[in-house]
Image: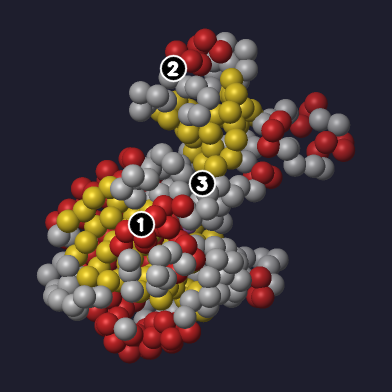
Amino acid sequence: MRYEPGEETLQLLRTLSEAFGVAGFEDEVRTLIQERIEPYVDEMRVDALGNLIAYRRGRGERVLMLDAHMDEIGFMVSYIEEGGFLRFAPLGGWDARIIPSHALTIKTSSGGFVKGAIGTPPPHILKPEEREKPFPLEELFVDIGATSREEVEKLGIRIGSPAVIAYPFERLNEDVVMGKALDDRVGCAVLIETLRALKDEELEVTVAANFAVCEEVGLRGARTAAFQIEPDLALALEGTVAADVPGVPPTRQPTALGKGPALTVADRSLIPHPKLVEFLLGVARDEEIPCQLKVPPFGSTDAGAIQQTGKGAIAGVVSVPCRYIHSPFSLMRLEDFQHTVRLVVAFTRRCQELL
Ligand code: CO
C-alpha cells in the first residue's frame, strides 16, 4: 500500500535535508528544530556542547530518551593555497573515492555560503596507471573561482571553515526521495513527527528528546546528554545503511528499502538488551507495522554511548533504511519513514511495560 505523505512532512524532510549542519556546526539545524518542536514540549534547553534537549513530562518517574543526531559528515578547510585553492580535511567517515568532482558549499565566518568545485585533473592528462587509482584525499582541492589567498580570506573563508557537498532534496517518484544528510536528518524528522503525534496524549513516561551534536565524529553529544537526562530507557533514531543493490550479497546488506523500520540486534557500538528488541517486535506485530532486523554488526550509533553513560540505560536503535549514506546523497522510501514514526509512537505509548 502506498504511503501518501502530507505536504507538511515532505517539507520537513526537505528543510532538514538541505540545512547545513556539519559535525560541530549544527546551529542552523538546531534552530529549525527548536521552532518546530516548541508547541509539542514542556521545556527545552541547549547544553554546553550544543545538544538540544527537550522534555515532555509524563505521569510517572521513568524517563525515555529519544535521540537523533543533527550533524552530518562534511569537511573543514585545512589550508588555503597562495593561488586561492583550498585544501580540506574530512569530518566524519567519508569514502575518499567518491569525493572528487562534486560541488561543495562552504560556510563563511559571517554565516554566508560560498560554492566551489572539488577539482580533479582531466583524464586527458592522466597517465594510464593514474586512471586506475582513486585520488588520495590530500591531493584534492576546492576551486571557488578565486585567484589568491587574499580573495578567499575576504570572503570570510579561513582555516576551520566547515563545508558540505551540495545536493538538493528531490522526490524521485511517489514513494522515493533523495537528498543529502538523511543520516540523520531522517531520524530528526522521525523524532519531531513522534512529538507531534503524541502532542495531546498523557503518557506514563517522561520523554526526553535529544537532538545530538557530533555523532559522526564519535558519538560525542549523546554521551553528555545521557549524563544529564539519566534515562531508564533509550532509543537512537537513525537513517541506517541499506545495501539492497546489485552486486552485494544478502549477508552484507544490513537493511533493505521497503521492509519498514530496522531494529538493531548488535552493531559496533552496542548490543541492545534482547528484551528491548523482543518488545519492539511485539509492538510492531500488534500494530501491524512491517519491520526488519538489521544484519549485524555494521555501523555504530548514539545508543552505544547512551547505554554506557552514568548508571547505564536499556538502549536500542530504530532506523529508517537509506541507501548510499555517507556519500553525497542518500535515497529512502517514504513508507519506511512513515512506518518508523508509527513504531516509535506506539513504543513510546507502551514502553513503561518494559520497566
Ligand atoms: Co547516523
* 330 up-or-down from 138: above or below: below
Whether residue 189 is visible here, answered yes or no, is no
Q: Extreme front residue here?
A: 311
Whether residue 134 is visible here, answered yes or no, is yes
Pointer 1: what residue? 225
**Residue type indicated by callout 3:** Ile
Q: Residue at x 34, y 40 (%)?
A: 27
The answer to which of 190 and 1 lies nearer the viewer is: 190
Badge number at residue 30: none
Where residue 6 sits: x, y (%)? Answer: 25, 62
Pointer 2: what residue? 155
Q: Look at the numbered discs 3 and 1 and tell me whether their residues touch, using CB distance below 8 Å.
A: no
Which badge, 1 or 2, comes first in the chain's sequence?
2
* 37 up-or-down from 206: above or below: above
Query: Gap between marks 3 and 2, in whole Å?
Result: 23 Å
Which badge, 3 or 1, comes first in the chain's sequence?
3
Pointer 3: what residue? 73
- Tell whether circle 1 marks a residue whose Cβ is less than 8 angstroms from ligand 1: no
| Quadrant holding the N terminus | bottom left
